[in-house]
Amino acid sequence: MATSSYLKSTVFRRTAVVVLLLALVAASCVGLVGWYANSLLTRGTEKMIEAEAAELKAELVARGFDALAIAVGERSRRGGASLYYLADANGQWRAGNLTVLPTWSGASGRGTFTYPSIAGATRTSRVAAGLLIDIDGRPRLVIGRDVDDQRALLDAIFRTTGLAAVLLALLGLVGSVVIAHHVQHRIAGMSAATRHIMSGDLSRRLPLDGSGDELDRLSMQLNDMLARIEELMTGLREVSDNIAHDLKTPLNRLRNSAEAALAAQSGAEAWKSGLERVIDEADGLIKTFNALLMIARLEAGSGPDAFETVEIGALARDVHELYEPVADDAGVQLTVDVTSNPVSRVNRHLLGQALANLIDNALKYGVSHGRPGQIGLGVSQADGFARIVVSDNGPGVAESERDRVLRRFVRLEASRSKPGTGLGLSLVAAVARIYKGRIKLEDNAPGLRVVLELPLA
Amino acid sequence: MRVLIVEDDREIAHFVQRGLKESGHGADVVFNGDDGLEHALSGDYDVIIVDRMLPGRDGLSLIQAVRASGSRTPVLILSALGEVDDRVKGLKAGGDDYLTKPFALTELLARIEALGRRISPDETVTRYMVGDLALDRLTHKVTRAGDVIVLQPREYRLLEYLMRNAGQVVTRTMLLEHVWDYHFDPQTNVIDVHVSRLRGKIDKGFDKPLLHTVRGAGYMMRDGDV
């Protein structure tokens, strides 16, 4: 990865700013402490010098110039950091451990001056703070204190602090480059995976490093989302494949009927029956489309607003009454068993359609050859749910197939030859979902039992 | 009967117009909601067919405006929206019947006929007669040639609806809607079986059938051939 991309990286920029701020704060702290210590020491020195100047002036006034010279001589001999210079009326050295009048850094006679210091063979220039006092209108007395060591100490403190700040900044910048590299590396992995997914590989997942940090957790969540999307896409693809197949077949039959009628030599009669077959096929297609649209709308979550309180037991009796003659004609015994009359907030027509689909399914696929068909429609109430059971004594549905038959257009091999859209149970499942109910397929030993549970009103 | 068709799809509008004319009715066609309202308010129509989605003023607001003017002319709503909700909204707006596209022409014609007769106050009629079959709406007694026929409650309602619309085609959907009060697709020929049981009770043993099957359309009560 190029260096310029690190410099652009958010992590690097943020870290660098923080490191520089930190270095600045540390430097200012140490600088402030140094400046304060220096001014404290300087003030102390100035006070001592002023006190001494007052003493010496008092000596001069009380006992005269010679006594002052003796006092300066005595003080000079005590050693230490004190510095003195006293000149006579002609400006010649008279007493003190300084032999020449020192040069002041400032214009006035206050503040600091430098003086030569001889230690063995080396001659160095040292810094002192001091006061120049006039005697008889001429500057002749200097009282000073050597502050060179103090200055050197402060200089050392400032230098080390500066160095430390620079080091801190450098180390921090190196650190932020390392962090930026790490984060950039992980994000590059994620964006590579994203590009693959965008180009169509929905099975691809974002890389995890197993650390469980926030990036890892984010990746895990995105992976869960991708898994869900893949599942939905697979479902969609399956549905489109099925739609293509299940709508192509009747369209093909429709076309064949029209073609056969057109080719028929016998004239009007053949055309008429051909057109009737065409209309039948078209009606079948319209039915399939209507059912498909209804399921799609329910699955999109936009159920009917027209809710009403429906007595499920009464509805079941109605639907039973509607289907009983058909079942009777087919030699099937359709019984209704309503043990209670629970009330749910649903749409009567929609739930009626669901019950009709279940009974129609039982009539079409729930009758075994050579066994008198028995279909039961039961309504009961338990645990806050209205429970609708439609059972038959037919071949049943293998346990492994029970989830699958709820999907759109799924028709089991055994029933492929019989008429039907493969949408009946999907609609019942969609109705269960929209009303926050449940649908279960169970073994009726023999046969299939479909249980639809809806929350009570 | 004079029918106003308000439908922006010209092909459907003309198809319906031709169908109505062939059945002996007059039909005017307009293609948008504003013209539709103007015609509905000025013209003298027995039934109005209104498409739900129209350019300009939409179907529902057209119906509301017609009703607001005090007109009671029956309105049939045609719509590509077939959900339970859409139907309820359409009827609430003042429509009298609702038919989903794509529809069969026979279904549309049967419904128009039924709507057109609604203005006649047949609710006050207490006795329906078709040939020698009589239905008394007060005592719920049904007789044919003087012999009493015993019917189940649902069979009675089925016969009552068929006799009220005697001489007119009644489709299976109309029966499901009016006799059972259901708007769903029963998947199988449930209605046919109910009708054939009724036929077994009222026509069996008599030379002249009164309950006829109209191929590709539905049923008709009639004294004589269809």
Image (spheres, helix red, strand yellow):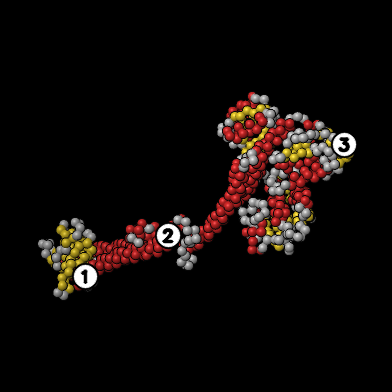
**Label 3 marks which chain's residue?**
B
Q: Which residue lies furthest to the bottom in this view?
A: A120
Residues beneath discs 1 and 2 located on the same chain: yes
Q: In which quarter of the image is residue A394?
A: bottom right
Label drawn at residue A285? none
Q: What element carries label 1?
A: helix
Residues beneath discs 3 and 1 located on the same chain: no
Q: What element carries label 2?
A: helix
A126, A293: nearer the viewer = A293
How far across and how far down the image is residue A328, in percent? 78, 52
**Label 1 marks which chain's residue?**
A
User: Badge 2 is on which residue?
Assistant: A192
Q: Quadrant of residue A149?
A: bottom left
Label drawn at residue B145? 3
* Cα separation between marks 3 and 1: 158 Å
Residues beneath discs 2 and 3 located on the same chain: no
Amino acid identity at mark 2: Ala
Name the residue: 85% across, 41% down: B205
Mark 1: few/some/many CA within 10 Å (<14, 14-19, 20+):
some
Circle nearer the viewer, 2 or 3: 3
Amino acid identity at mark 1: Arg
Name the residue: 37% across, 65% down: A178
- A85 sits left or right of B36 in the view: left
